[in-house]
Amino acid sequence: MRSAQILLLLCILGAVLWSTAKANNANIPEECCFAYYQRRIAIDKIKAYEVTRSDCSKKGVILITQRNYRFCANPEEPFIKKVMKYIDESKF
C-alpha cells in the first residue's frame, strides 16, 4: 500500500514538473537573428520579409527569396529599409 502511494505521488510530481517545463517553452520565438548576412541580395530576388519578434536579443529582418532561402538582415540598414518598402508597395 505504501509503495502505491509513493508511486502516485511521483506520478503527480512528474506531471506538475512536465507541465511547468512545457509552459515555459511556449513563448519562445521561432526565429531570431544572431548574425546579419553581409552581402546584398538583388531586390527582385526577394519575395517577402518577416520582422523578428521583440523578445529576440537582436532586432532583425528575415528576407525570403524566390527560392525560399532565408537570410537575416539589419533592419536599420538603408538598403534593407528600401527592400522592405519595395516589397510593401509591390503587394498593393
Image (tube, grey):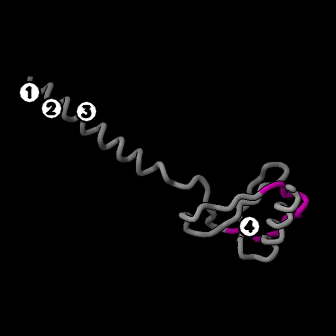
Percent across and percent down for residue 34 are: 61, 66
Q: Nearer the viewer, mark 3 or mark 4?
A: 3
Marked residue nearer the N-terminal end (3 or 4): 3
In space, the residues marked 2 and 3 are separated at their CA atoms by 9 Å
Q: Which residue is mark 2?
A: 6
At label 4, the amino acid type is Tyr
Marked residue nearer the N-terminal end (1 or 3): 1
**Quadrant where the C terminus is found in the figure:** bottom right
Compare residues 87 and 47 and report the one nearer the observer.
87
At label 3, the amino acid type is Cys
At label 2, the amino acid type is Ile
Q: Which residue is mark 4?
A: 37
Indicate yes or no whether the magenta region holds residue 41. yes
The reply to whether the C-beta atoms of the residues labelled 2 and 1 are less than 8 Å apart is yes
Compare residues 39 and 76 and report the one nearer the observer.
76
Q: Secondary structure at mark 3?
A: helix
In the image, what residue occupies the spot 29% across and 41% down?
16
Q: Residue 37 sits in which quadrant?
A: bottom right
Q: Secondary structure at mark 4?
A: loop
In the image, what residue occupies the spot 25% across and 33% down?
11
- In screen coordinates, is 16 left or right of 62? left
Q: Which residue is mark 1?
A: 2
Give the total of numbered labels.
4
Density class for disc 3 (Cα within 10 Å; few <14, some 14-19, many ≥20) is few
Percent across and percent down for residue 73 are: 72, 67
Percent across and percent down for residue 63 are: 76, 59
Q: Which residue is mark 3?
A: 11
Residue range (magenta): 36-48
- In screen coordinates, is 47 left or right of 58? right
Marked residue nearer the N-terminal end (2 or 4): 2
In space, the residues marked 1 and 3 are separated at their CA atoms by 14 Å
Query: Compared with residue 9, is residue 91 higher up or lower down, i.e. above or below?
Result: below
